[in-house]
Amino acid sequence: MKRIAIFASGSGSNAENIALYFRNSDKARVEAFYCNNPKAFVIERAHRLGIPLMLFNREKFYSGDEVLNDLRSRGIDLIVLAGFLWLVPENLTRAFAGKIVNIHPALLPKFGGKGMYGMAVHKAVIEAGEAESGITIHLIDEVYDRGKILMQAKCPVLPGDTPDSLAERIHNLEYEHFPAAIERLIDE
Ligand code: GAR
C-alpha cells in the first residue's frame, strides 16, 4: 500500500477527487493534505473527508525540515502537487527524487514558468489565440514546471471562451486523467 501526500494551495478540487479515487483502493491511499494558505478551501475539504492536514507558512516550508519530517513520520511514498503554487524546496526534491508529481493546466512547455498558475494560465492561452489547450502531468525537480512529462491530454479552446469557461473544461480533463496517471506511476 503506497501512501500519498497531496499539496494544495487553493480550492483543492483535484485533491478531493484523488482522495476519493483511492478511498477503496488496495494500491494506495491519501494519508494527508499539506497546505500553505490558511484561507484555502482545501482545508474545509480535508475536514469533511477526515484527512489530516498540515498547514505551513513560508518560514516552515523553506527553513528546516518540519514538513519533510512530517512526511517521513507518515511514511509517505509519493507527493502529489494538485494546485500547489510554491516552488518545492531542495530538501523535499532530494528526499523524494522522482516521487513528486505535478499537474499543470496547459500543454507544457508552453504557458509554464513562474506566475503561470490557475486563471493566469487560461487567460494567457486565450490571449495568445491558441486553438487548443490541455493538461500536463509531470515529475518535478527544483525548477518550476520542468521535469519528465508523464502524460498530456488536450481540449479545444472555443471561440468566445473566457478564462472561467476554459478552466472548467481543463478541470474536467484533470478529474478524468490525474488519478489514473498517479495509479500508473504507482504500478510502475
Ligand atoms: C488546477 O487547474 C491545476 O492544474 C492548477 O491549479 C488548479 C487547482 O485547482 N495548477 C497550477 O496552475 C500549477 N502551476 P483545484 O485547487 O480545484 O484542484
Image (cartoon, rainbow, N blue to C red):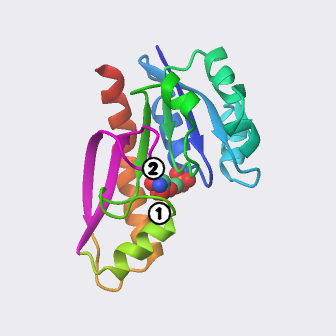
Q: Position of residue 151 (x, y in %)?
A: 26, 43
Q: Earlier in the sequence, mark 2 or mark 1?
A: 1
Name the residue at 57% across, 37% down: 89
**Ligand 1 has an atom within 8 Å of the beta carbon of the residue at disc 1:** yes
Q: CA distance from mark 2 to mark 1?
A: 10 Å
Count of marks overlaid on the render: 2
In the displayed structure, 81 sits above or below 96; it is below
Q: Quadrant of residue 75?
A: top right
Q: Quadrant of residue 139?
A: top left
- Please provide the residue range marked out in magenta: 131-155
In the displayed structure, 129 sits above or below 109; it is below
Name the residue at 29% across, 65% down: 133
- Which residue was labeled with disc 1? 116
Tell me the SS state at disc 2. Answer: loop
Name the residue at 49% across, 43% down: 17
- Residue 69 lies left or right of residue 118; in this view the side is right
- Labels 2 and 1 touching (C-beta < 8 A): yes
Q: Position of residue 102 (x, y in %)?
A: 43, 43
Q: Position of residue 187 (x, y in %)?
A: 31, 21
Mark number for residue 158?
none
Tell me the SS state at disc 1. Answer: loop
**Ligand 1 has an atom within 8 Å of the beta carbon of the residue at disc 2:** yes
Q: Is residue 113 visible?
A: yes
Quadrant location, the C terminus? top left
Q: Nearer the viewer, residue 97 or 50?
A: 97
Magenta region's main secondary structure?
A: strand
Q: Is residue 13 magenta?
A: no
- Which residue was labeled with disc 2? 144
Q: Amino acid at mark 1?
A: Met
